Image (cartoon, rainbow, N blue to C red):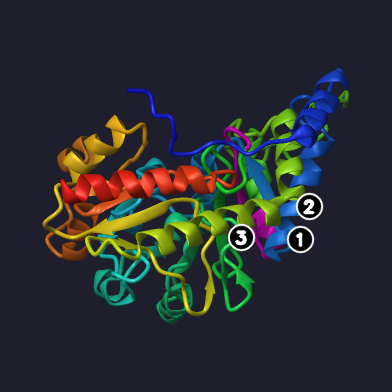
Amino acid sequence: MTADIPLFRISWGREEITNAIDSITRGSFWANGPYIDEFEKRIEEFVGVSNAVVFNSGTTALVSALRSHGIGDGDEVIVPSFTFISTVNAVRIVGAEPVFADIERECYGLDPNSVSDCITPDTAAIVPVHYAGRPCRIRTLVDIAETHDLVLIEDAAESFGATVNGEKVGSFGDSAMFSFCQNKVAATGEGGAVVTDDDDLAAELRLLRSHGRASSDYFESQSSGEYRTLGNNFRLPDVVAAIGVAQLQRIDELIRGRRRVARRYRESLATLDAVEPMGEPADGRHVYQLFTVTLEPSVQRDALMGALDEQGVSSKIYFHPVHRSAYYRSTHEKPVDHLDVTEEIASRVVSLPIHPELTDEEIDHVVSSMETALTA
């Protein structure tokens, strides 16, 4: 049946509409207009970095980040398998080889010990994921990267606004990627960004984003500009950036809404012994792009999800391990027998509906539906 309570719903208001109309009715600069600069500036200020370069998706942003760091043929890049597949695909797209490290149980991010075990002379980078809105053990992973002279690119697609000791995720690595896909903390439909304090890296990212062209005034200039490198058309349209500006104007409100929903869930689920919600980090802030719970091994997950669906409650598995996908089963040759925690967690997690405007009544219906299914 169609879920009465969907997994997510985009939170939008009058400002998103006003900005989009302004961008459209300007009659030009749809591809490269003033909202691009404003969106990037707001990202820089929010994350606390010197440079933000926006892209048309988080995937193209991560591909460009890898390329700008010189990652390519012959390189190995350490990634989790417990992630959305684009984290790993980006590594393959630039010609490098993904190496899967295991995750740890507390935040479902890369296990530093497993990462250390995966390092070889061919290792060039680590791409840790901040899963579901919760920071991974990023400081320890940065220390490992620095010890071995490796690039560290944060995949913060799901964690815009998450913090560690007051510092935003995305500000720890050599660079970081954010996604603004429709189900993210700040949403523009599609979109992404790379942030960095390295000015030269940011300049390279801008080249890669727009055909390798040094000039940004192609559409309003008589000159075609100079093409300095092999680039792509990964530009974010101005009207999409206009929506992003409106989203960032109320980003604190959006995060508060998600945290309110998560708090209600945790309180309501406390009596269900078979369900363990992700906890709050002791040293940071979880922004709950997903509300993921881990089920006791005795729970039949598929049956539970089917029962929720019958009650109009959407649910989904985030994530199935990437190394078990059809493509990587047939092409990945590195060992995967060390991914014990990945295998276990991926077999037990399920994500419940969450968005900033989810009502207490809807949350209570989700929880009561789970309770009914678990006690049937």
Check disc 1 and give the amino acid type. Answer: Glu
Q: Is residue 19 left or right of residue 361?
A: right
Choose the circle earlier in sequence order: 3 or 1. Answer: 1
User: Which labelled disc corresponds to residue 161?
Assistant: 3
User: Which labelled disc corresponds to residue 41?
Assistant: 2
Q: Does residue 374 appear in the picture of this structure?
A: yes
- Quadrant for the C terminus, please: top left
Q: Is residue 143 left or right of residue 18?
A: left
Judging depth in this view, the residue of 269 and 214 nearest the camera is 269
Judging depth in this view, the residue of 249 and 336 nearest the camera is 249
Residue 134 in magenta stretch: no
Which quadrant would residue 234 be assigned to in this image?
top right
Q: Is residue 319 left or right of residue 300?
A: right
Crowd around label 2: few <14 · some 14–19 · many ≥20 (10 Å): some
Q: Position of residue 238 (x, y in %)?
A: 75, 31
Alpha carbons under labels 2 and 1: distance apart: 6 Å
Alpha carbons under labels 2 and 3: distance apart: 15 Å
Magenta range is 188-203
Looking at the image, which residue is at 35% across and 65% down?
Answer: 270
Choose the circle earlier in sequence order: 2 or 3. Answer: 2
Q: In the rendered structure, are the residues bearing label 2 and label 1 in contact, judged by CB atoms less than 8 Å apart?
A: yes
Alpha carbons under labels 3 and 1: distance apart: 12 Å
